[in-house]
Amino acid sequence: MNPLAAELNEMLSQHNANVLESLSDLGKNLFFPKGILTQSAEAKEKAHKFNATIGIATEKNGPMYLPCIHEKLSAFDPKDIFPYAPPAGKPELRQLWRDKMLEENPSLQGKHFSMPVVTNALTHGLSIVADLFMDPGDHVVSPDMMWGNYNLTFATRRGAIVKKFPTFTVAGGFDVDAFKAVLRNSAEEKGKAVVLLNFPNNPSGYTPTVEEGDAIVAAIKEVAEGGCNVVAVTDDAYFGLFYEDSLKESLFGKLANMHPRVLAVKLDGATKEEYVWGFRTGFITFADGHEYENSPVMTALEKKTLGIIRATISNCPHPSQTFVIEALKSSKFKAEKEQKFKVMKGRALKVKEVLDSGKYDKAWEYYPFNSGYFMCLKLKNVDAEKLRVHLLDKYGVGTISIGKTDLRIAFSCIEEKDIAELFDLIYKAVEDLS
């Protein structure tokens, strides 16, 4: 083991051995090298005559660039576009995002958590979690209505076993009892579990109520008190898109500093929150069971995270980070975001109005939804994949089939005026196949 990795592990051992126990073999061996980047950072500080360390080309005291590229980006200083960004992300962006998290998550007030590290959007953050914490045979606890990419990230790449529980009760609420049962089984079998909490949920579009959220947190704490190490991951990709009765903040705030055996990990980003999917700008933030600032545990986890970033993508794109900084600092940001939220809420409520009309009841029912981009139909008489293909071939309508009965509809990309027609066409297709 590299001495730097051993040093980080010793920090964890001294300050929270439960986090060290939760790491995968790869996680234990990760470190951030004191190599070119460290030497370049020192040179940037002290090399006042010549700096021959950085792996970019320069001219006239700035980065070299092609005018034909910069002319499209002329509103930005070349130094904020063309050089490499720091491995952890631009410090200004990290601070702005942390401030935003505190403003939007009241339960984070007074809690101690790491500075967000910039990731190449949410999938990259999930991959970092998998590398840090998953060995073959480890358990990931997730609702059965989950984003399919979890299988690739955790099971295929890292050999973990995804332990699913029913997302909903018969009455239509989040099935907290089923979650408890699967989590307890994992605790008894492995003594460690990664819990994936994706709200608003993809594909169902559901966010738990405040009471359900408190029950989820209580279940995690109960298992931790029983001796199980829990890595509680909040996949907050669709954060902020809460339209009706539900939590209005991330469970990360309630999980942070809750128990020494609970490590909370927040994954979020500008990708969907700020409607900049192609920017690929996300964040990973940690909080363990300790309530003090400048935690050595946070320092060690950040350096191990930087080790993964350095070993895989080196660093995240610089222009995207600059663009997000400018957006977060803009006086128009909140008003423009609120306007888009109203559009999205209008579409969600229109879907409910159309589906509650009763005209489609013999063809399907729908799963509860109150947030996010999506909702799911539960088909009564036809196979979901056959319906998906028929909708494409005959009506030119694209949907996503999930299993035999479920059809996911992304109302996020359907104008409100077109929603009734969309479901009429889906109904016609069901009648064709019935």
Image: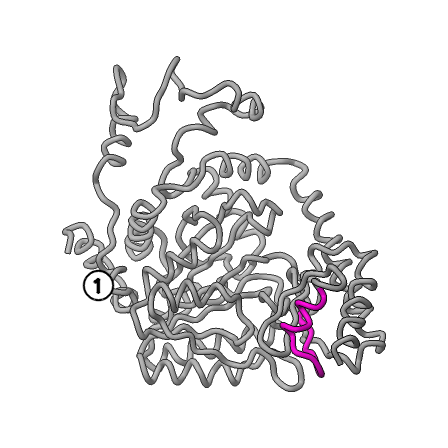
Q: Where is residue 16 in the image (x, y as percent from the top left)?
A: 27, 64
Q: Quadrant of residue 52?
A: top left
Q: In this view, does 252 lie above or below 337?
A: below
* Three-letter residue code for mark 1: Ser
Residue 389 inside the magenta-drawn segment: yes
Q: Is residue 433 above or below residue 201?
A: below
The crowd level at tag 1 (other Cα within 10 Å; few <14, some 14-19, many 20+) is some
**Element at badge 1?**
helix
Q: What stretch is highlighted in magenta?
A: 375-391
Residue 272 inside the magenta-drawn segment: no
Residue 224 located left or right of residue 92: left
Q: Where is residue 303 in the image (x, y as percent from the top left)?
A: 29, 49
Q: Which residue is drawn at 29% across and 27% down?
A: 54
Residue 341 located left or right of residue 4: right
Residue 36 located left or right of residue 328: left
Q: Residue at x 37, y 72 (%)?
A: 230
Q: Which residue is drawn at 55% across and 47% down?
A: 270
Nearer-the-camera pick, 296 or 35: 35
Q: Position of residue 5 (x, y in %)?
A: 20, 54
- Looking at the rendered image, the quarter that the N terminus falls into is bottom left
Residue tagged 1 = 13
Q: In which quarter of the image is residue 393?
A: bottom right
